[in-house]
Amino acid sequence: MGSFILRRIIYVIPALIAVSLISFLVIAVPPGDFVDRLAEEAAKKGDIMPLAEIEAMRRAYGLDQPLLVQYWSWITGVVLRGDFGYSFGWNLPVKEVIWPRLGLTVVLSLASLLFVWVVAIPIGIYSAVRRYSAGDYFFTFLGFLGLAVPNFLLALALMYVAFAWFGQDVGGLFSPEYIEAPWSWGKFTDLMAHLWLPMVVLGTSGTASVIRVIRANLIDELHKPYVTAARAKGKGEFALLMKYPVRHAMNPFVSGQNDIFVDIVSGGTIVAIVMGLQTTGPLLIKALLEQDMYMAASFILMLSVLVVVGTLLSDLLLAWLDPRIRYQQG
Amino acid sequence: MTTFDETSGMVSPAPEKRRGQGFEGHWALVWRKFLRHRLGVLGGMIVLLAYVVAAIPDFLAPVTLEAYNPAYAYAPPQQVHLGVSTEDGWQFRPHVNAYKTVIDYNSGRRIFTADPDSIVDIGFFVVGEPYRLLGFIPADRHLFGPVEVGQPFYIFGADRLGRDILSRTIYGARISMTIGLLGVAASLVLGILVGGVSGLFGGVVDNVIQRLIEFVQSVPAIPLWIGLAAAIPRDIPPLQVYFFITIILSILGWTSLARVVRGRFLAMRNEDFVKAARLDGCGPVRIIFRHMLPSFLSHIIATVSLAIPGMILAETALSYLGIGLRTPIVSWGVLLQEAQNVRTIASAPWLLLPGVAVVIAVLALNFLGDGLRDAADPYAD
């Protein structure tokens, strides 16, 4: 197990390097930079930025350097000093903006994952055991619908329902009075009161796919001889179900968690923009449109790191659950 | 075909009972198995219908894309009535009612109510605005619409410029349905190439490519898509934006296809019929295209149909955020841009109707893909 963990962790390092390179290049390679954007805006207002000033600004921000040099100074800053560079749009170091946002992103993503488990596992087991019952058809249909409705549309629809029928404006993660407030019990409960809607929205498609996976796997297991044998020995139906076939059906479910977590983090970006959540999404798109490149690159980098680390954790969890995997690769 | 069937005919004690089963080719078996998947067939029909709509939206939509009428901004959907009751009794006469408008000076908005006295007759194959069918056949007939041109006909409601949402949703199918197809086509080229190389060569090459695929799959797609889409210059023509978006979607979309192709190649490399072909002196190209490809084509088709919905959803989301397609291109995502905040939606919920088209299309494609996947291997049971 020890060597397996070590190998997986070593494998993560090139992935992280590649991720950081991609997040930087996506932002830096396309033509135009933040200074161009400033000059454009100045031109719109009617005053023209002198060329010398443009050049001086570029030099001050280090934008006149070759791309790889820019990348190198950015990434060494991130790794060695935890310094993500400077946000042009906010006039602040990126790290001051990014950490609280990332924290909330992690909270929301984990809450959604938890929601998926709590809802999908019992329903999946029920659907498999009561196969072709009315309940099974109902949940299967709901699952298909959950996969087909785009996240942001679901968010819009739920916000509409909450607004039109319950008179609640449910955007955001906090009530206005708590947004700038320091953490307190009141702020925490306020967060919990706002968290459920984005949690449900983000969890829906994952729930749908987990139900399908568990149902299919459990149906395969339910009619195997070992189940019949245990039943013949007089084990109670529920205890039997939980002890053998469900445990067996859990393996593909655990290995699928990875993709679901990626989807939640990735889909969270759009849902956050639509619902105005105080997570990474809205700032990411703002930074991209303003070509605030260190900000945008840092957001994409940190979201990818979140996913890579999530992948690592789920691989380790799977290896712990299923010895066959660690013997195969370790 | 026949050599194989002779053996099964010999084994079977009563060949006349089997009635042709075992004498059919691969595709006939696939087709037969697909027909047994009811939801798949239903999905297939809806998908077919959607592509017909995408091909001739000008004929199916009551008005063209250019039509607008500010007097009917945010007009709510009209109810279709099948007939009128006169003193002679009920009479068949499909119609909608025109609007009575009152301006609410508090909110500055028009309030529309149906006007039961003013009837707008609906007809089939009515003469409307002229258009070019399939881009070159001049025509002016529309499948349905108001009998008199220019009368208010908004059964899906109107948007902020008084444009008919039904017509625009029908036109939206053209872009939304094809962008999935094109994106998948581009991914397919990449997927077959990379997956084929990976499966054929094996060893180190395979290992490197598999790690690459794992890596691409572990990158959160939407932030990266947003990053790439935001980099598209604002001032290029719409058609180019369309192609850029297609490419962006396929940059991350090829991996699942590559996996399927590789898996098939690996499984098939050592099959007897491939060995036989090799011993007969066939070159690698002929082996791949003449012998291997036909036997996994059905798997590829199934994977492709399951990949399209993801592309449609991604395009919709990008366009909704304003960094995907833009007007004058009309896709379902572009139409949903109108529903930007909850207050707009609360006062005009019908702006979300193009989203229903997205859901139906994605559902149908998923059902079709499921059916095809089951049918792809007709020898399973």
Image: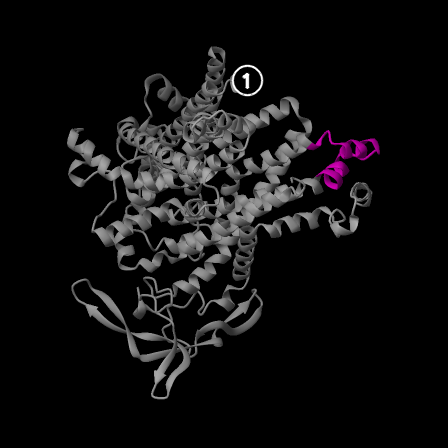
Q: Where B59 sits versus A157, above or below?
A: below
Q: Position of residue A129 (x, y in %)?
A: 46, 37
Instruction: Tell me the crowding category of disc 1: few under 14, some 14 to 19, or many 20 or more residues within 10 angstroms, Cα based.
Output: few
Q: Where A197 sits versus A238, above or below?
A: below
Label 1 resides on the chain identified as: A
Q: What segment is highlighted magenta in the picture?
A: B268-292
Q: Where B140 sits versus B302, above or below?
A: below
Q: Secondary structure at mark 1?
A: helix
Q: Say which residue label 1 marks.
A: A329
Which of B306/A227 is in front? A227
Seen from this angle, which residue lies furthest bottom?
B88
Q: In the rendered view, does B379 fall on the left or right side of B82? A: right
Q: Position of residue A58 (x, y in %)?
A: 35, 32
Q: In the rendered view, does B33 fall on the left or right side of A54? A: right
Question: Which SS does the magenta portion mostly show?
Answer: helix
Q: Where A34 sits versus A14, above or below?
A: below
**Residue at point 36%, 53% (across, down):** B337
**Residue at point 75%, 41% (across, down):** B290
Q: Is residue A66 visible?
A: no
Which of B342/A64 is in front? B342
**Could you tell me how many numbered marks the image carries?**
1
**Residue at point 34%, 30% (across, down):** A110
Q: Is residue A174 visible?
A: yes
Q: Position of residue A65 (x, y in %)?
A: 41, 27
Which of A25/A44 is in front? A25
Q: Which amino acid type is shown beneath numbered disc 1? A: Gln
Q: In the rendered view, does B162 fall on the left or right side of B289? A: left
